[in-house]
Image (cartoon, rainbow, N blue to C red):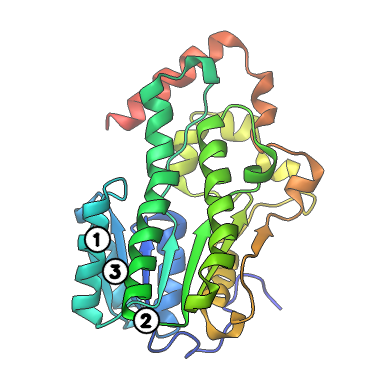
Amino acid sequence: MDYTKKMLRDDALKGKTIVVTGGGSGLGKAMTKYFLELGANVAITSRNLEKLENTAKELEAETGGTCLPLQCDVRHYDQVEAMLEATVAKFGKVDSLLNNAAGNFISPTERLSANAFDTIIDIVLKGSKNCTLAFGKYWIDKKEVDKTILNIVTTYAWTGSAYVVPSATAKAGVLAMTRSLAVEWAKYGIRSNAIAPGPFPTKGAWDRLLPGDLKEKFDLAKKVPLKRVGDHQELANLAAYMLSDFSAYVNGEVITIDGGEWLKGAGQFNLLEAIPEEMWDQLEAMIRSKKSK
């Protein structure tokens, strides 16, 4: 068996409509591709419409599925409602919400402005709340059942992690929301679960988190007992299972997929304690230069 191969049968998501926030690139794109391959219709959202359109065109050509690009800033509830409305107008219904949109950067907390802290909280926690609330209200009002919310959290949602405090704070909130709604909304036929991935490097996100030669100096694979990082298909396999009818009895669960990393050492970025003060200045300059491009 090969862990990079597809897991479910080809029609496992046939007839389902899934919304993936942050679906234009990285892990969101990888999961979207697999959902399409399994027969789902998928709406992908982010703030960058051009990227979404390119991704949708590429994935439709590769899979033969239907991928709808929708510009949406999840920080704004009215945009989320409009995105939901557009999805229903296109596909007639929506079965699952995958809250994948996120933001993160590494920094000593005392160096963060209040606005920088708020930016991460707003995208990760407020954005997930906005989507969850809008979709949940819609399903409950329409008396639609067999619906699924799947949140992407992180292993440091349990433990916290130095140097990514806004992300840890926001993800912990999403984790609490996941478990709370699993109980409260089950009576409406809505399941709520989460996945906590360990290191699954994507070029964009990891270049911002660990710019320059930091990726080599702080090789996260060395922290994983299995001595490797995750393959995108592994995460896509798990996400597809969690959104399929095969997981119909899974509710309120948070599944860790990290090769045992968090058990070996809590706080994914605690190792950054080794960075000297002057190097943080260099890192901030590198991160700002990447964001300005």
From the image, state whether disc 3 or disc 2 is nearer to you.
2
Q: Nearer the viewer, residue 127 or 209?
A: 127
Residue at label 2? 143
What amino acid does circle 1 point to?
Glu
Residue at label 3? 58
The picture places residue 130, in percent across and down from the top left corner, at 35, 53
Can you name the residue that lies furthest to the top here?
A: 278
Quadrant location, the N terminus? bottom right
Residue 57 seen anywhere in this rendered image of the structure: no
140 w.r.t. 288: above or below: below
Q: Earlier in the sequence, mark 1 or mark 3?
A: 3
Quadrant location, the C terminus? top left
**Alpha-carbon neighbours of circle 2 within 10 Å: few (<14), some, or many (≥20)?**
few
**Alpha-carbon neighbours of circle 1 within 10 Å: few (<14), some, or many (≥20)?**
some
The picture places residue 226, in percent across and down from the top left corner, at 77, 54
Q: Report whether 252 appears left or right of 190.
A: right
Secondary structure at numbered mark 1:
helix
C-alpha distance separating marks 1 and 2: 18 Å
Q: Nearer the viewer, residue 19 or 149?
A: 149
Secondary structure at numbered mark 2:
loop
What amino acid does circle 2 point to?
Lys
Tell me where residue 232 sits by quadrant: bottom right
Q: Residue at x 50, y 65 (%)?
A: 150
Q: Report whether 190 appears left or right of 101.
A: right
Q: Residue at x 27, y 68 (%)?
A: 56
What amino acid does circle 3 point to?
Glu
**Alpha-carbon neighbours of circle 3 within 10 Å: few (<14), some, or many (≥20)?**
some
Residue at label 1? 81
Q: Report whether 277 appears left or right of 266.
A: left
